[in-house]
Image (tube, rainbow, N blue to C red):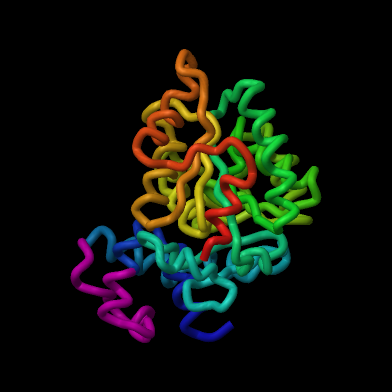
Amino acid sequence: MDEFKKRLIHLHHCRGVGWKTIFQILRNDPQLTSLYKGKPYPFLPIPSQELLLQDLHSSVIPEQIRQYSNNHIHTITILDEQYPELLKESYEPPWVLYAKGDISLLRREVKLAVVGSRQPSDYGKNAIEAIFPKLIERDVLIVSGLAAGIDAIAHRTAIKNKGTTIGVIAGGLFHIYPKENKDLALMMMKENLVLSEYPPHTTPSRWHFPMRNRIISGMSKGTFIVEARQKSGSLITANCAVQEGREVFALPGNIFSANSSGSNELIQQGAKLVQSAEDILEELFSY
């Protein structure tokens, strides 16, 4: 690991250091050569400077980072070749990704984000069962958030059809949420991939969930919404995809079902209505 990468990963672990702070620090010190020298970066508030100094001179953080390899955790910075190209083009791409599993999947070209309700109907489940086999035949990699409901169904269905899948979680790799998906996550860490932008010891916070949606859509050529209520997290993912100029697909639903109100609204706004795998494939492979 080169010195710049070591410094960036260490900085990424420091308390109170978010995406914008790292951006400011890199703008002032592109190689992070001043990171361990005296008072860092006077543009930071005094309390943030004090926390940063404490963590930069802590022996605990470097030891945590050294232990990641023993737990088969990969640290991938935005400058590493394994970092997904499409994600680099997204809004506030993570400076560092923490991954466990097959990191070659990150470089797979055709990825489809699939998200939806945490309380799906049989209709949503059956739609995934019907649509996924042909996607898998064309080597489409399924990206989702390892949440309850459609996310877990998407991961499991991809695996059942001998496809590949990436789970992007809120919080760190040592704190899988929800707990009922822990076995699924552990299985994916062996045969597929689980990914986070937070250091592994980070416990999930409420604000992590909408933030990880930009990664799900950001690394994918398109996003498929399967059953979503209005103002749901799935629509945040769809909006991220729209902002990045990516394809948005939606499963049409019952007009009397609250679970489909958000999906149907997306179709009204221009998302592609999906009735079969071909509706997705013709867009993903058109360029």
User: Is the magenta region chiefly helix, strand or loop?
Assistant: loop
* Rendering quarter of residue 192: bottom right
Q: Where is residue 249 in the image (x, y as percent from the top left)?
A: 49, 43
Please give the name of the residue rendered at 42% of the width and 43% of the height, measured from the top-left corner: 238
Give whichever of 207, 228 is nearer the camera: 228
Q: How many labels does the image show?
A: 0
Task: Classify 257 as above or below 62.
Answer: above
* Residue 159 in view of the camera: yes
The magenta span reads 23-45
- The picture quadrant where one finds residue 137 is bottom right
- Above or below, comparing residue 62 to residue 223 in the picture: below
From the viewer's perspective, tell me whether residue 187 is left or right of residue 62.
right
Answer whether residue 58 is magenta in the image: no
Spot occupied by residue 173 in the image (x, y as percentages of width and height): 61, 52
Residue plotted at (42% across, 41% down): 271
Q: Can residue 203 be seen in this view?
A: no
| Front-lying residue, 279 or 18 | 279
Horizontal arrangement in the rendering, residue 53 relative to residue 108 (left or right):
left
User: Residue at the spot x=38%, y=57% of the render?
Assistant: 245
Q: In which quarter of the image is the N terminus?
A: bottom right
* Percent coordinates x, y for residue 26 in the rendering: 32, 76
Which residue, as the protein is rendered here, is positioned at the far top? Answer: 256
Q: Is residue 254 above or below residue 131?
A: above
- State the image coordinates of residue 41 (x, y, percent, origin top left): 25, 74
Using the image as rendered, state which of residue 137 and residue 62 is in the foreground.
Answer: 137
Q: Is residue 77 above or below residue 273?
A: below
Is 30 in the magenta?
yes
- On the rendered structure, is 153 left or right of 10? right
